[in-house]
Amino acid sequence: MATRTTFVSSVTSVVVAATIALSGCTPRPDGPGPAAEKFLAALAIGDTATAAQLSDSPNDAREALNAAWSGLQATHLDAQVLSAKYAEDTGKVDYRFSWHLPKNRIWTYDGALKMARYERRWRVRWASTGLHPKLGEHQTFALRADQPRRASVNELGGTDVLVPGYLYHYTLDATQAGSGLALSSTAHAVVDVLHPFNDALNDPQLLAEQASSSTQPVDL
């Protein structure tokens, strides 16, 4: 009985050991995270050639990545992988970009890379949305400075005292408008357009006479 028990225990130990060894040799499928990290690492240092080669459309990707860097006039990019998920041979990697722009400005936003596995290798499925979720096909970034809106002048209670606006200055030059019927027609057109803004401007004939007799353009 003792011999039999020892034999069974030994066999059991061998079976368990074999099972553990087989489990250790079975490879687990890799997700798209590492490939996306390589892509983002290359993009972050401006190595658009390497980043583009990690996509399924290297030429289009490199052109778009170069345009993004130059359009934003960026000095640096911080790229961070937030999460990665996949099913079979397609996946998505969420990222966070922080572009460092001129004058110490930083533009941060979240986006996602579409991923696909080709012959056991994950690649970025290139699309413009890989750079920004709202970027359309064949669109790119452009950094520009817009003039700020002029502020109003307020009195102590908050009421507007002076509001920004535009001042337009019009003149009628008879030498440019022509003579005779041409000048008369122009005078009628001017009165029709400007009379709602200037009640005194209501006589096309008088305006035509003033313009024709003046050596300088007539202020309206």
Image (cartoon, rainbow, N blue to C red):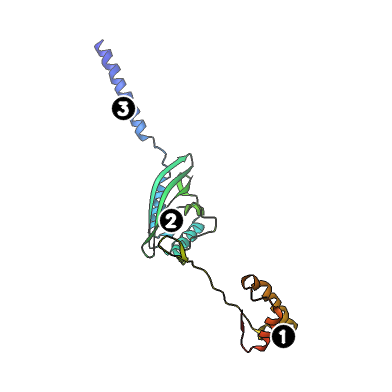
Residue 220 position by quadrant: bottom right
Q: How many marks?
A: 3
User: Earlier along the polypeptide chain: callout 1 or callout 3?
Assistant: 3
Residue 143 in view of the camera: no
Closer mark to the observer between disc 1 and disc 3: 1
Nearest the viewer among 27 and 174 is: 174
Q: CA distance from mark 1 to mark 3?
A: 110 Å
Residue wearing tag 2: 51
- Secondary structure, mark 1, is loop
The three-letter amino acid code for the residue at tag 2 is: Ala
- Secondary structure, mark 2, is helix
Q: From this viewpoint, which residue is outermost toward the right?
A: 181
Residue wearing tag 1: 179
For residue 42, above or below residue 217 = above
Question: Residue 161, image x and y in percent?
Answer: 46, 66
Nearest the viewer among 69 and 61 is: 69
The three-letter amino acid code for the residue at tag 1 is: Ser
Closer mark to the observer between disc 2 and disc 1: 1
Nearest the viewer among 83 and 23 is: 83
User: Earlier along the polypeptide chain: callout 2 or callout 1?
Assistant: 2
Q: Kindly identify the residue that appears in the image at 45 percent across and 55 percent down.
A: 53
Say few, some or many: other residues with alpha carbon within 10 Å of mark 2 (under 14 / 14 to 19 / 20 or more).
many
Residue 182 in view of the camera: yes
Nearest the viewer among 167 and 90 is: 167
Q: Kindly identify the residue that appears in the image at 34 percent across and 34 percent down.
A: 24
Say few, some or many: other residues with alpha carbon within 10 Å of mark 1 (under 14 / 14 to 19 / 20 or more).
some
Q: CA distance from mark 3 to mark 2?
A: 44 Å
Residue wearing tag 3: 17
Q: CA distance from mark 2 to mark 1?
A: 69 Å
